[in-house]
Image (cartoon, rainbow, N blue to C red):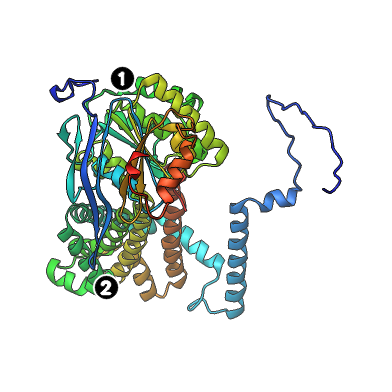
Amino acid sequence: MLAVNPAAATAFEPLISVRDVTLQYRSETRITTAVYRVAFDMLEADRFVLLGPSGCGKSSLLKAIGGFIEPAEGEILLEGRAIAGPGPDRAFVFQEFDQLLPWKTVLGNVVFALTAGRALDRKAAEERARHYIDKVGLSGFADNFPHMLSGGMKQRVAIARAMATEPRVLLMDEPFAALDALTRDRMQAELLRLCEEFRFSVIFVTHSIPEAIRIGTRILLLTPHPGQARAELDCSGIDAPDASGRLLSERINALLFERAPAAGAERV
Amino acid sequence: MSERNQRADRMLVVDRGRHEVTERERSLWRSIYAQGWIRKTFVLLVLALTWELYARYLNNALQFPTFLDTLAALWRSLLSGEIPIAAAYTIPILLTGYVAGLALAGALTAFASATRIGADLLETLTAMFNPLPSIALLPLALLWFGLGEGAVIFVLIHAVLWAVALNTFAGFKSLSPTLRMVGQNYGLSRPAYLFRILIPGAFPSILTGLKIGWAFAWRTLIAAELVFGAQGGSGGLGWFIYERKNQLLIADVFAGLLTVIVFGLFVENVIFKLIERRTIERWGMSS
């Protein structure tokens, strides 16, 4: 699967490089800037979290990486090449339950993703689909239609579908936000387990600080109106105190919501 | 602090086996009443009885024959082959017009979903022609295509095309943005996107369009045949009705109308119901 790319020869060559990207929405009467000059690099096997309150443009940024929105300024590179439009090398998992095709069974949904764009034959596709459906624990539901599944199960199918295409990066847009707290907790644990097993590179959008800390290896903080990068923090998966004894969650809170950032805030 | 009695925790065993429950028995009357078709049959029987009683009270077979007379006339016309022949004349024309209308609606909607000017064209045309009753075009159609099937099929296409195109396009437009993005994400080609995402995703609306188009076509055809009857053309079910009225065989007129109703009910409740059950009900897409 791993295409050898001369640009990706060194280990620290970013998998995805977002370079001063500005995103704008145009309506007939005005232009709204959703994201203003955001830049970051994401490395192979990172679980890169975009964290911020609503209105910070984190979803828009993810959609731009997915190729659904064209930046008004700046560029987005995947393994050194500028992305042009959506593609199966960046598989999307959405928040909405209706991302599954209601007219296809669980198995059919995953097979669809595998046979849609490329020439994977039906039998191989079905085999691989069953493998990933098994990985998310839904083997017993392969022949069910989506409307018979619970919200958590639907999101698991969406994750299996995205993983089955074996993309370069998984783009997850608040995939657990519409789930109840108990299910969300279990899904986070499952996602981490799958990431450990398959070494996926993930960009994960959320507005929940605990979720960001639990999922992320790197956390990019975005402030709203328009979305601008505030800080990029390293994360070990637990809410650990820094040298001065402040918890990571406290630092994130302070960075996101303090009105006037003190001079030298970049060194947090 | 207020006093609070401590109570012991309760630990229970959860049954992981089969959870069989014997259903509570319903009374015979309620289980009969729960069947939709039994209730509807009952309604039909009451209507038939009212008809019969009123017609007997009126006692004027030339204006309002009784239900039983109508049934007898229907039976006679079925056996003599008159109604089957008329239906065999009507139905192929209906199907030709319907299918041609669908094909044109498909082409127009595909164009509309591909380009913005196509969408404008579709919206303008449907806004103009959808409110125009098809039968109003029959005089023109007769002028252009002469007395015959061509004129009727033209009118039928008009009846089907706009309703189907309008609903299909509305279905395309209301498809959830998430599903659109899913389709684009997996790198579908444009035709594959149309056939594998747009059409199944819009199927509830498309089916509504198919039903409306069918009802329009059926009504239009019967009306067109009545006009043909007036012009002395050859016969389908509408013509059968018109001709029997001229011969003052009013029970036969009612029998013809009954046939039109029964055929319409059959298509609605059997054929379309079957499609619905196999598709949108199975997929959980029926609203």
Work out whether residue A105 can be spotted.
Answer: no
In front: mark 2 or mark 1?
Answer: 1
Using a 10 Å C-alpha cutoff, classify the residue at mark 1 as few (fewer than 14 neighbours), some (14 to 19) or many (20 or more).
Answer: few
Residue A8 picture quarter? top left
Tell me the SS state at disc 2: loop
Q: Chain of mark 1?
A: A
Q: Which mark is residue A124?
A: 1
The vertical placement of B24 against A54, above or below, is above
Q: Residue at x 73, y 52 (%)?
A: B29
**Hey, what amino acid is under mark 1?**
Ala
Q: How many marks?
A: 2
Q: Quadrant of residue B209?
A: bottom left
Tag 1 secondary structure? helix
Amino acid residing under circle 2: Leu
B139 sits left or right of A267 in the view:
left
A179 vs A9: above or below: below
Residue B234: image location, x then y, percent: 25, 64
Report whether A33 appears left or right of A102. left
Q: Residue at x 85, y 44 (%)?
A: B4
Please give the label number shown on residue B132.
2
Give the percent coordinates (x, y) of residue A44: 28, 25
The CA span between labels 2 and 1 is 53 Å
* Residue closest to the eye, A181 or A35: A35
Where residue A186 sits in the image (x, y, percent)?
53, 31
